[in-house]
Image (cartoon, helix red, strand yellow):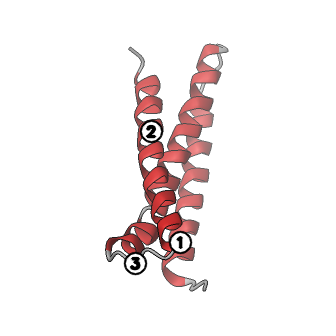
Amino acid sequence: MNTTANVKKVAFLFFLAFMGTHLLATLLTSNGYAWTILPILRNSLDLPALMSGILYAFASMKLYFEEAGKKTDLFDLIAGIVGGIVLVGAIVVDFFIKID
């Protein structure tokens, strides 16, 4: 089986798990449940969800280009640069810019 297709499937499963847990923690916190673990989950699962979403999106696009018979060397480079910039930007916003 194709490695990119497997990466796409695993990234989708991680995205569902991370976003589901993040969304559930956010909803429970906003409804007044004050468990100790909820703020930790809410604040720590946004970056893994973003990273798995980016990986899923770029794996899907790469599979599309491969099925069309196009070379993906340049796309891999551009996807890595764009994904890295988005991830570093999210880390900077998450850790260094306080949004209340």
Q: Is tag 2's residue or tag 3's residue first in the polypeptide sequence?
A: 2
Q: Residue at x 39, y 70 (%)?
A: 38
Instruction: Say which of 52 and 76 sits in front.
Output: 52
Q: Is tag 1's residue or tag 2's residue first in the polypeptide sequence?
A: 2
Q: Nearer the viewer, mark 1 or mark 2?
A: 1
Question: For mark 2, does the 10 Å Cα neighbourhood hold few (<14), some (14 to 19), or many (20 or more) residues?
Answer: many
Element under disc 1: loop
Image position, residue 9 (x, y; %): 44, 29
Q: Residue at x 61, y 14 (%)?
A: 67
Image position, residue 10 (x, y; %): 40, 34
Q: Residue at x 59, y 43 (%)?
A: 79
Residue under circle 1?
31
Residue 11, labelled with which disc? Answer: 2
Q: Residue at x 47, y 51 (%)?
A: 20
Q: Is residue 80 above or below residue 48?
A: above
Element under disc 3: loop
Question: For mark 1, does the 10 Å Cα neighbourhood hold few (<14), some (14 to 19), or many (20 or more) residues?
Answer: few
Label 2, label 3: how far apart the Cα atoms are: 31 Å
Task: Tell me which amino acid carries mark 2.
Answer: Ala
Task: Tell me which amino acid carries mark 3.
Answer: Ala
Residue 7, labelled with which disc? Answer: none
Element under disc 2: helix
Q: Is residue 73 above or below residue 54?
A: above
Label 3, label 1: how far apart the Cα atoms are: 9 Å
Residue under circle 3?
34
Residue 81 located left or right of residue 1: right
Image position, residue 4 (x, y; %): 46, 26
In the rendered image, the residue lying farthest to the left is 36
